[in-house]
Image: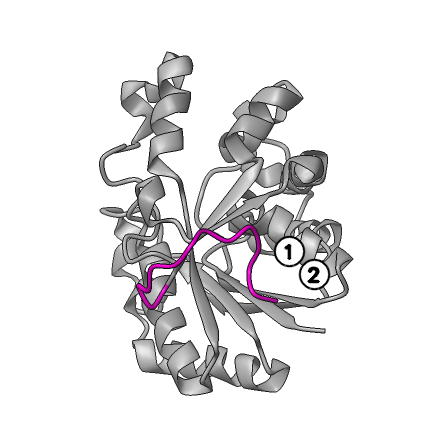
C-alpha cells in the first residue's frame, strides 16, 4: 500500500483536478489523504441555503467531508487558514489569510502530516496556481517546501491542460465570455509539459456526485452539473500532472503509487 496526499487550497478544489485520481487510488487499495489549506469562508452562496444560525464555514466543512467520502479519502485535514479571496480583493489584506502566512510555518504543518503518513506521492499546484488565485499560488510554495522538509519522494503539480481548454472553448464559445475571468494564455500549462495523464472517464459520475456535495458552490459547479455526460467527460475525464522537479520523462498513465 502506498500513501497519496493531495494538497488543495479550498473545499471543492479537490473535485476538479484530483477527484478521479483519489478515487482510483483508494479503489486500488492505497491510502488517500486530503489536506485543504483554507476554510473557504470567502465567496458567494445561494440565498436560503444556510439554516438559521449556520455559518458558511461550517457548511463548507460539511460539504468537504461529504465530497471526501465520495472520493474515497481515508483522512481529511483542514489547516483552516482564512480564505484569501480572489486576487485584488480586500480579503488579500487580511494578515491571517493563507496568502500572508509565512511559508515556513504552513510548510511545517503540512510536513508533519506527510511525515506522520509516510507519504509516497504528494500533489500540489503549479507556480501560477492554475489561474493566478493567491491561495493556489501559496499551495505551490508551501507544498514544495513541505515535501522538501519531509523528504517526499514523488511530488507532482496538478495542472490544467491549456491546449485542451483551447479546444473546448473553440467548441463552446460561451465558455469564453468576457466576464469569465479566464486568461487562456496563462491558464494551466501546455500539454507538452504534462508528465502524467490519468484517464478517469469511468469515474465521471463519481466526480459529478462530489460536485453536487458542494451545494454552496453552485456558482462554480452549476454549469457542469447540467452537462451531458460526454461533454463533462471531455472536460474532466482526464486528470493531468507535471513533475515538480522539472524532469522530463515519457508520459505516465498513473501516479507512481
Label 1 crowd bin: few (<14), some (14–19), many (20+), radius 10 Å: many
- Where residue 217 sits: x, y (%)? 55, 38
Which of the two marks, 2 or 1, is nearer to us in this view?
Answer: 1
Residue, disc 2: 73
The C terminus sits in image quarter: bottom right
Q: In this view, does 221 lie above or below 105?
A: above
Splitting the image into 4 quarters, where does residue 61 fall? bottom right
Report the disc number at residue 22. 1
Residue at screen point 32% across, 49% down: 193
Splitting the image into 4 quarters, where does residue 43 fall? top left
- Where residue 142 sits: x, y (%)? 36, 71
- Where residue 156 sits: x, y (%)? 44, 62
Identify which residue, 175 or 78, lies in the foreground: 175
Whole-number angstrom distance, CA of label 2 to CA of label 1: 7 Å
Q: Does the magenta stretch include residue 178?
A: no
Q: Does the magenta stretch include residue 249?
A: yes
- Residue segment shown in magenta: 244-257
Q: How is the image coloured?
A: one colour
Tell whether 58 sits left or right of 151: right
Question: What secondary structure do most residues of the magenta stretch adopt?
Answer: loop
The N terminus sits in image quarter: bottom right
Q: Is label 2 in a helix, a strand or a loop?
A: loop
Q: Is residue 46 visible?
A: no
Q: Dots 2 and 1: beta carbons under 8 Å?
A: yes
In primary-sequence order, the first of circles 2 and 1 is 1
Residue at screen point 73% across, 56% down: 72
Identify which residue, 23 or 47, lies in the foreground: 23
- Where residue 109 sits: x, y (%)? 47, 81
Report the disc number at residue 253. none
Amino acid at each position: 500500500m502506498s500513501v497519496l496526499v493531495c494538497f488543495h487550497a479550498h473545499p471543492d478544489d479537490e473535485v476538479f483536478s484530483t477527484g478521479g485520481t483519489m478515487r482510483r487510488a483508494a479503489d486500488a487499495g492505497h491510502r488517500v489523504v486530503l489536506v485543504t489549506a483554507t476554510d473557504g469562508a470567502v465567496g458567494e452562496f445561494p440565498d436560503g441555503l444556510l439554516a438559521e444560525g449556520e455559518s458558511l464555514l461550517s457548511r463548507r466543512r460539511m460539504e468537504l467531508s461529504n465530497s471526501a467520502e465520495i472520493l474515497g479519502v481515508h483522512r481529511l485535514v483542514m489547516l483552516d487558514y482564512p480564505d484569501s479571496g480572489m486576487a485584488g480583493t480586500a480579503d488579500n489584506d487580511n494578515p491571517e489569510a493563507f496568502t500572508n502566512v509565512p511559508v515556513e510555518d504552513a510548510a511545517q504543518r503540512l510536513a508533519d502530516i506527510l511525515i506522520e503518513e509516510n507519504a509516497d506521492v504528494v500533489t500540489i499546484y503549479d507556480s501560477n496556481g492554475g489561474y493566478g488565485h493567491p491561495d493556489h499560488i501559496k499551495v505551490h510554495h508551501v507544498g514544495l517546501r513541505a515535501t522538501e522538509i519531509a523528504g517526499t519522494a514523488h511530488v507532482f503539480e496538478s495542472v490544467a491542460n491549456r491546449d485542451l481548454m483551447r479546444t473546448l472553448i473553440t467548441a463552446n464559445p460561451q465558455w469564453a465570455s468576457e466576464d469569465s475571468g479566464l486568461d487562456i494564455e496563462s491558464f494551466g500549462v501546455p500539454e507538452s509539459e504534462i508528465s502524467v495523464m490519468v484517464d478517469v472517464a469511468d469515474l465521471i459520475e463519481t466526480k459529478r456526485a462530489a460536485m453536487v456535495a458542494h451545494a454552496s458552490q453552485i456558482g462554480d459547479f452549476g454549469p457542469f452539473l447540467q452537462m451531458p455526460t460526454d461533454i463533462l467527460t471531455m472536460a474532466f475525464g482526464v486528470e493531468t500532472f507535471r513533475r515538480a522537479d522539472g524532469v522530463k520523462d515519457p508520459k505516465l498513465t498513473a501516479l507512481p503509487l
